[in-house]
Structure formats: structure tokens, C-alpha cells
Image: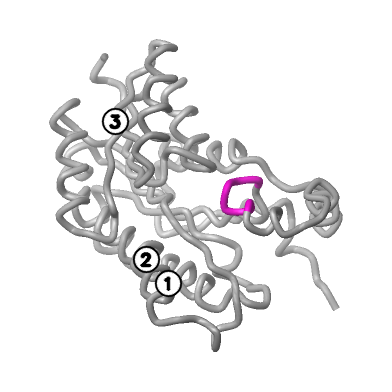
Amino acid sequence: MSFDRRVVFITGGASGIGRATAELFAASGDAVAICDVQEARAQSLQVELEAKGFAALSVTADIREASAVERAIDIAVGKWGRLDVLCNNAGIEINRPANEFTTEEYDAMVDTNLKGSFLCSKCAYPHLRKQLGSIINTASVQGLACEASTAVYASTKSALLGLTRGMARDFAPEVRVNSVCPGAILTPMMDAFLASQSDPQAAIDAMGKNIPLGRVGRPEEIAAVIYFLASRGASYVTGAFFVVDGGLLAKLAI
């Protein structure tokens, strides 16, 4: 590969927004490291991208474990000699009233959505600063205004926005740190909800009617914003969050 191209490390990179992000960076000529706990799915995406002539690598890691994160990033840097972009995309969502959460479920959500992003950023920083690179965190509109039964999930995403701003200060001027806040997006994270519906497509259509743009979003629409935030076009953007929700938060519901 040409080393004027970037090396991009994407957690949760094998499906949903992570997969769309990997495909976009790869198609643009960048090398992508697909980090996911689903080893077979990550390897399958690597094979697909390589078959198209793109530079790709799959690594399996539980981002809740510091040693696993360090190993995964070392593999990517060892293969390509550098790291330019970190996309902290991995996350889990469990929706139920706060009083019904178990301690184990709470720990799993916080450790994945918040601690995992912190560990990846901390480990990636020494490599990113050499390239004047960037970090993009996948937060959520739930971190700004939440639905019922999302207290724990929303709190992790609110905290991730705080981590974004804090790291933007700590890592400046060498590394930029920003967040995207997706709204309702058709990803595997929505599958549990759709599986509980008698007519999943009708449920998606009904959801879209409550969004000003009239539809649920697609993973590639979030990937496009992530790609922009990693680009030279966003060279003066850090400590910011970009809401990508079809106008959902602009709607006043009374």
C-alpha cells in the first residue's frame, strides 16, 4: 500500500455502522483494521474487502480488557507501521427501566460503551499523535435526550460526549477528537426491537413518520460523517459532536 494513505482502526467494525465505515475508508484507499468480538464476521469482511483489492485486517478483541486492546492495536501498527484514525464504534444496548437492571448488565454496558472507548483511545494516542491523527467516537442522540428505558445506555453515551471533550483538550494539538450522535439507524442493534414486532417493516415505517426527514437512517449515512471528521476538511474541528438523526432532536414533542 501507499503510505500516503491512512491506517484506520475501527472497533465494532464487522457490522452496522462499523462495517459501513470500514467499507467507506477501504474504498477510499485507506487500510482498515476491523476490530470485533465476532471473529468470523470480522474475518469475512476482511476477505470481502481484500477480494476488491482493498487493504484490510481483522483482529479479535474484547475492548473491555486493556491487554486485548493493546494487542489489537499493536497488530495493526505492526502490519502497516502507523495509525492515523481510531473509530470507537463498538457498543451494546439493553433497554429496560433502570430499577430492573442487574449489576452485571450495568457493568457490561459501561465497560463496553465508555471504558472500551477510553482504553482504545489511550492505547492509540501514542501512534495517532505521530500522524496528527484523529479519534471519532460513536455516541448517540440518547446521550442528549433519552427515551424511556434507556437510562443506563443514555448515561454511557452522555459520558462518552464528556470523554470526547476532555480528550480533545488533553490530546490537542496533535490529535483531534470528535463524536457522532446517530439517531434511529437500521443496524443489528435495532434487531431485538424489530424481532418483537409482528410486522417489522410496519414498525420501521412508523418510526420514520416521527422523524422530520420521514425515514430511519442508514449505516452509510453515519459512516459518511465519520469519514468527514477524519478528513482534512475537518482539520479545525475538535471536541465537537455531530448529530445525525434526520432532524429527530429538532422536533418538539408535546
Residue 215 vertical placement versus 169 (above, below): above
Contact between labelled residues 2 and 1, with CB atoms less than 8 Å apart:
yes
Disc 1 to disc 3, how far (Cα)? 27 Å
Q: Residue at x 24, y 59 (%)?
A: 119
Which mark sits nearer the N-terminus, 3 or 2? 3
Local secondary structure at mark 1: helix
- Mark number, residue 7: 3
In the picture, measured across the screen, residue 13 lies left or right of residue 64, that is: right
Of the two numbered discs 1 and 2 in the rendering, the one whose residue sits closer to the viewer: 2
Residue 45 is situated, as x and y percent measured from the top left of the image, at 42, 27
Magenta-tinted stretch: 186-191
Instruction: State which quarter of the image contains the C terminus.
Output: bottom right
Q: Residue at x 56, y 78 (%)?
A: 151
Q: Amino acid at mark 3?
A: Val
Q: Amino acid at mark 2?
A: Leu
In the picture, measured across the screen, residue 214 lies left or right of residue 89, that is: right
Residue 244 is situated, as x and y percent measured from the top left of the image, at 63, 51
Contact between labelled residues 3 and 1, with CB atoms less than 8 Å apart:
no
The residue lying toward the viewer, choosing from 54 and 240, is 54
In the picture, measured across the screen, residue 78 lies left or right of residue 250, that is: left
Residue 251 vertical placement versus 234 (above, below): below
